[in-house]
Image (tube, rainbow, N blue to C red):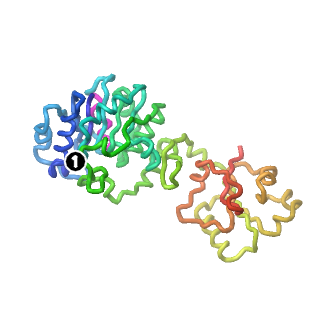
Amino acid sequence: MNISIATIPPRINDGSLLKCIKSFENQTYPIKKIYVNLPKKFKRFDEMDNLEKIIKDMSKLIKITRTNYDSPALKWLGFLPYVDDEDFVFIGDDDQEYHPELISNMLEGIYDDNSVYQNRFHIVKTGTAGIIHGFVGAMCKKRLLNNLPNFNLPKICWIDDQLLSIYFHKQNIKIRPSPISDFDDIYFKLNQYDREQIGIGALCKMSLPRQKQIKQLEYKYNCYFQLKENPLSKGKIINVDWEELINKPLHIHFVCFTKINDEIRNRIKKVIKIYPKAFINLWDYKAINDPEKVKTSTLINYHTDEFGKSLLTKKGINIYIHKDRIIEDDFNIYEYLLEGKEEYYKNDMLELVIKEIL
């Protein structure tokens, strides 16, 4: 069993790293090495005098690595040249003090050594983009990470959990739940709110465009984090050819059961502004009651699901928007499409419907 973490100068100065290292030394399961992974040059911090000596003096188990990459993903990368393929590696964060029985308890839950094991799996999978969460701890055999250096890593990446979730997905490596879910079983010491510690310089405290970075990773690796039970959360990853998807003809249909007023016009204008190349079609309340007109028109009546399906002839992506739907500035048709929503009615009111025609 090996341990791998990345660290930054503030965590050394405030004693966080030392406490973290001691918690690994105190594990009931014997630890072979503790890898402390550093960039050759920090982007966010000034270089610290005697940095390597200060870290090495914390424990005889420590081995320091230096890599030409400054990212929290270093805790998944730096140790790779030094660890045997069949050795296990626990990946954690340098601002946590881990429970002394954590490693032993995680090992008891491993039944497939071709998988990665994630603590708090059933919670974190619906709490952010992806399933990997380094701060609560993950574990796998080193050989599962051998392809990571060749994974066309982004030049700048401050969201390693999402990056590694994509990596395991693309490598067809399963992320499985460990037996550990409670914070009390993960940490030796919790913060004042009975949660994990949040150290100085934490990425979660930076004003990072998190959603923008996630979207950049999705486009880079042709994938998408699907929404799960919590509408604000993401978990499952699906493969997407973004270039092919975005280049398909986009037909947007506004279905109006009443006369068009200024409010409806403004909503239509907002969609046109967001998607200027889309074909915009408008169904008014008169056309809906005239089936003959529908059959000969380029517009499509979606008054009922079956009737609408039988007349759907436009190839590409067809989007149906009810006149009362609020169009936010971040409205994204492709995200709705990738969520697979095909609701025709909800609470007796036509909702946004997305149907791809092949």
Name the residue tied to disc 1: 8
The residue drawn where x is 56% and y is 42% is 240
Left or right placement of residue 142 versus residue 131 in this view: left
Q: Is residue 261 above or below residue 318?
A: below
Is 267 included in the stretch rendered in magenta?
A: no
The residue drawn where x is 28% and y is 53% is 202
The residue drawn where x is 19% and y is 48% is 16
Residue kind at label 1, given as amino acid type: Ile
Q: Could you tell me if residue 280 is visible in this image?
A: no
Left or right placement of residue 54 versus residue 211 in this view: left
Is 73 included in the stretch rendered in magenta?
A: yes
Question: Which residue is nearer to you in this view: 293 or 321?
Answer: 321
Counting from the top left corner in percent of width and height, residue 286 is at 82, 69
Counting from the top left corner in percent of width and height, residue 113 is at 40, 25
Instruction: State the quadrant of the C terminus.
Output: top right
State the extent of the magenta-drawn residues as a range: 72-81
Which residue lies most toward the right here? 292
Report the number of numbered marks.
Answer: 1
Dominant secondary structure (helix, strand or loop) of the stretch shown in magenta: helix
Q: Is residue 53 above or below residue 279?
A: above
Question: Which residue is nearer to you in this view: 104 or 324?
Answer: 104
Instruction: State the quadrant of the N terminus.
Output: top left
Question: Which residue is nearer to you in this view: 210 or 19?
Answer: 19
Q: Quadrant of residue 331?
A: bottom right
Q: Quadrant of residue 133?
A: top left
Label 1 element class: loop
Bin the neighbour count of mark 1 within 10 Å (Cα to Cα): few under 14, some 14-19, many 20 and up: many
Q: Is residue 280 above or below residue 176?
A: below
The residue drawn where x is 69% and y is 50% is 355
